[in-house]
Image: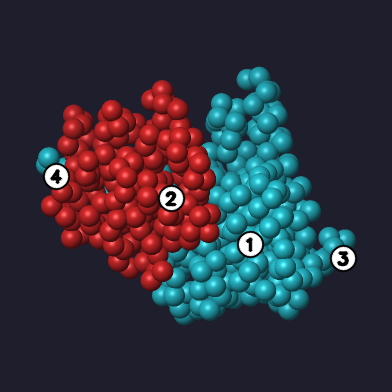
Chain colours: A red, B cyan
Amino acid sequence: MQGAFRLHLQALDRLGVEGFEVRTAADLDRCDGLILPGGESTTMSMLLESQNLFDPLKAALDGGLAAFGTCAGMILLASEVADGRSDQRCFGALDYQARRNAYGRQTESFETDLEVTGLDEPFHAVFIRAPAVEALGDDVEVLSTHQQEPVLCRTGAVMASSFHPELTGDDRLHQLFLDLLS
Amino acid sequence: MSETSTSRETGSPLVKRGLAEMLKGGVIMDVVNPEQAKIAEDAGAVAVMALERVPSDIRRDGGVSRMSDPEMIQGIQETVTIPVMAKARIGHFVEAQILQSLDVDYIDESEVLTPADETHHIDKWAFTVPFVCGATNLGEALRRISEGACMIRSKGEAGTGNIVEATRHLRSILGDIGKITKADQAELFEWAKQLQAPLPLVQEIAETGELPVPMFCAGGIATPADAAMTMQLGAQSVFVGSGIFKSSEPAQMAEAIVQATLNYTDADILAKVSRGLGPAMKGLEMANLETKMAERGW
């Protein structure tokens, strides 16, 4: 819809996987897994509604569609949103509360190295006006933390990150997501 | 799983350009108070630009135009959750220091305000907060990038509601990028000389076929069709200034422009969202302008 979707498509392309933009409910039927990119979560939630995509997407996720949400995508996958707009909707695909802009405004945005479960070498992560997650459900597995806070987590084939794996050209997390699909 | 000892690095080029990536496909709207900021956010804006007067009022009223009152900027920051940008005068590094201390998310070193330095732009590498700068041609864009700008917007002619200059600037920048991708190594030296731009940036464009930072469009967008046209020409997002709050139905116009920017290739949707918006802002002919803001910047 809006945001860094092109960079995600480039990552999938490098991994030899066919990616395409999901803009209609029909596009949704064609995909095996969905990436919810970074962008502005309030804008996205509104546009999903106005494009009549919110309910089909919710139904697909409820039905077990694999998904990877980064930054704003992490917020959209949440069961609840804190510090957002009161009318902001989310899919409830992962059991946590997402707190918007938990790390502050742009001057607080940062990059750092993370240890990630399942990866041998640290992953260089870029956090941009990033969200945090709290009140995690028992079935949410934390795959990485930064300063004791969870920043990458997963339940089944649904994964979410506070940071932007698409900005660095390191495709290991995309590969990790693709592995969840198979 | 263990915690790494690595600390956080703020203000790096990747972090600064990253936010611009997140704004792609969206609309950034000029607002002068918290009420307008709320309307913009409600309509689906990805960010707002806080300023004291929209460009068409700056044109009408004349006088020196400066950075906005910090109180107004903070009022807007408290009202919306989307990023808040603000403008500093060209070369006015102290206005930029103040805006950074206010924690704005992006600074626009803007020709819409009265320039504070007739030779130098702000050294944008010295800041943690990212900068967007205007450009009328590729050379100008590359000079701004070499000074540390993390987003370029084609200037257009702000406050006119006339898209013709935005079209000219977009075509000029993207046209030259196209030509550079076809140039051989020897020709790249000549391109750098002609553009008065650093050779490494010209070589980078030859390789990638695009600017090293996102390019948005500004200046003169007054209708959903204008927004869609600039997107089809190759802009990655749009800035809309006077076009929204000088139209007869700002909320509807704002939403329509958001929809048009998202669905910029779908003429059926563009037709639908263009209906019943009331008169757009009146607009001005280029030939009758006293001040061409786009000429500010060096």
- Report helix, strand or loop for mark 3: helix
- Report helix, strand or loop for mark 1: helix
- How far from the left and from the top, in percent, is residue B78? 41, 75
Sequence order check, earlier mark of 3 and 1:
1
In this rendered view, identify the residue nearer to me: B287 or B65.
B287
Examine the image and state in which quarter residue B146 appears. top right
- Gap in Å between the C-alphas at discs 3 and 4? 63 Å
Q: Nearer the viewer, mark 1 or mark 4?
A: 1
Disc ID at residue B270: none
Q: Can residue B140 be seen from the camera position used here? A: no
Image point (53%, 62%), residue name = B45
Disc ID at residue B256: 1
- How far from the left and from the top, in percent, is residue B159? 72, 66
Chain letter of the residue beneath label 2 in the structure image:
A
Q: Is residue A135 left or right of residue B189?
A: left
Q: Contact, CB < 8 Å: mark 2 with mark 1? A: no
Residue at numbered disc 4: B3
Q: Residues within 10 Å of mark 2 (few under 14, many from 20)?
A: some
